Every structure is written in C-alpha cells, then in structure tokens.
Image (spheres, rainbow, N blue to C red):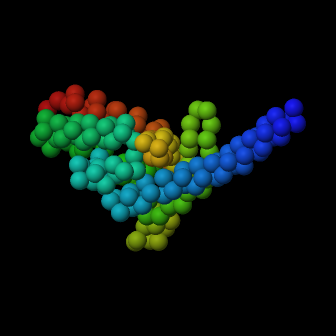
Amino acid sequence: MKIFSWTCGALLSALVLHGGNAVADTDANLHHATTAFYRVYLETRPSGVPNARARAKFTPVISHTLAQLLERADAAERNHAKVTKKQLPPLVEGDLFTSLFEGARAFSVEGCTRSAAATTCVAALRYTDASDQKTTRWTDKVYLVRNAGRWVVDDIEFGGNWPFMHKGHLKELLRKVIVDGNHARP
C-alpha cells in the first residue's frame, strides 16, 4: 500500500511540475506567435486586402482558415474592381489588420490568456504621425489557434474607438468583403 501511495504521489508531483512548465511554455509560445505575426505585419504593411505575394509572407503565422478568407477576399476585391471598372474605391482601404486606417508602426504584446472559449493575446499598438508627431495608441485582441502543433493567429478583434474604422472582428470584415465583392454591380 505504501508503494502505491508513494508511486501515486510521485506521479502527481511529476504531473504538477511538468504541467507548470507546460503552462509557462504555452504562454511563451502564445507571446511568440503574436509577436511573429506583428513582425510580418510591420515588414509587409499591406494596404487593403493583401495580394498573393503579401499573403505568402503571412502564411506561416496565420491559421489556414484566415489564409483562405484572405485569399477569397482578395478574389472578391479583384471581381469588384473588374465589375465596377475601377470606378469605385476598393471595399477595404487602408490597414486591414488593425483598428487604425494608417495602421500601426509599433507594437507590444501585453499579455495572453487561455479559456475554454478562446486563446487570446492583447496587442498594444502605436502609430506616430510623421507630420505632427502625434501618437495614437490602442489595443486589439488577437485570437490564436493551434496549427500543426504551434500557435498561429486566427482572428483579430479591433479595439480602436474612433469613427470610420473597422469594428468587430477581422474575419467578419473579410466575410463581408467576400459577399460584397462577389455581388458587385456596374
């Protein structure tokens, strides 16, 4: 009986210790995945829906679902431009991946959380206007999923509070672009 108790206690201790390391490792992985996404974003800085070349740079840091939505939204934008003979502006102008039309120039990952509903990281974003040096700061929430054993970005919840910019989630915006672009009329 003592051997059984000792063995169970040792196993429980090993699980607790290993679990603690796994949690810390997962938090670091979430932070790393979010950082990797924003590094690609800052390097690429696409305006509107990214084209195939820009999307290829994002592929390693985004989910398959998000990649498909971006591809379909790009096709819808091309259809919209063709049908309207480019007489109307694109369906998405300015920055697609942040709350601010001009986009972000800097970021920091403020923290990550996991729950039964979602795995998220908060990104603190900044844009400084070159002409007047005014800095705009805001936070967007980044949703992550596991893909092939690693964390990748699956969605972004826009947190900016100014008018005339994206509200809600990136995936919702892309779905709207797909519908509007595929139903464009001259």
Quarter holding the N terminus?
Answer: top right
- Residue 78: tell me if it is visible: yes
* Residue at left offset 40%, top offset 46%: 62
- Name the spot of residue 37 as percent of width and height, x first: 43, 54
Residue 26 vertical placement versus 115 (above, below): below
* Residue at left offset 47%, top offset 64%: 106
The image quadrant that residue 78 belongs to is top left
- Name the spot of residue 185 as percent of width and height, x first: 17, 29
Residue 21 vertical placement versus 172 (above, below): below
- Name the spot of residue 25 as percent of width and height, x first: 60, 53
* Residue at left offset 32%, top offset 37%: 69
* Residue at left offset 40%, top offset 50%: 61
The answer to which of 15 and 186 lies nearer the viewer is: 15
The answer to which of 136 and 169 lies nearer the viewer is: 169
Is residue 17 shown left or right of residue 98?
A: right
Residue extending farthest right: 2
- Residue 138: tell me if it is visible: no
The image quadrant that residue 147 belongs to is top left
Count of numbered labels shown in the rendering: 0
Quarter holding the C terminus?
Answer: top left
The answer to which of 162 and 70 lies nearer the viewer is: 70
- Name the spot of residue 153 as percent of width and height, x first: 45, 46
